[in-house]
Amino acid sequence: MSWSAQVWIKWKPGAEQQWDQWDWLQQWSEVKTAWSTMGEWDMALWVEASNPEQLEEFVWKKLRSNEWVGDTKTTWWHPVWEKKAA
């Protein structure tokens, strides 16, 4: 079973003006979907990984290394039980 996360992103001031298309996300195999959001956070990503270390590597080495990322908040989950079909 994979590990999944929502990664909330706060852009640095002025960065949001660059985003008129989203095809660059295809380069990140970990990202399953992305949302533009309003409020405290500017964007959210649904990320899947094999283990917690891969999630951490994505957030800290791949995502936060970008000059447009001001801050992130991550919530993750990993299935531990599933009801069997009758």
Image: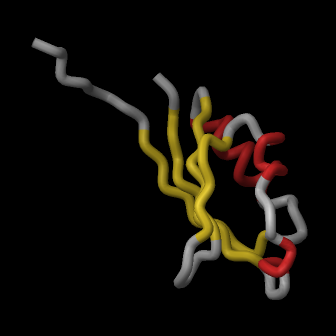
For image coordinates 83% across by 80% down, the residue present is 17
Quadrant (top left, top right, bottom left, bottom right) of the C terminus: top left
Using residue 60 as the reference point, say whether residue 68 is left or right of it.
right
Q: Position of residue 11 (x, y in %)?
A: 74, 76
Q: Position of residue 81 (x, y in %)?
A: 26, 26
The answer to whether residue 76 is above or below residue 44 is above
The answer to whether residue 38 is above or below residue 62 is below
For image coordinates 86% across by 59% down, the residue present is 65
Q: Position of residue 47 (x, y in %)?
A: 60, 44
Instruction: Name the quadrant containing residue 18.
Output: bottom right
For image coordinates 66% across by 43% down, the residue present is 31
Residue furthest to the front in view is 20
For image coordinates 78% across by 41% down, the residue present is 26
Using residue 40 as the reference point, say whether residue 54 is left or right of it.
right
Residue furthest to the left in view is 86
Closer to the camera in the image, 68 or 27: 27
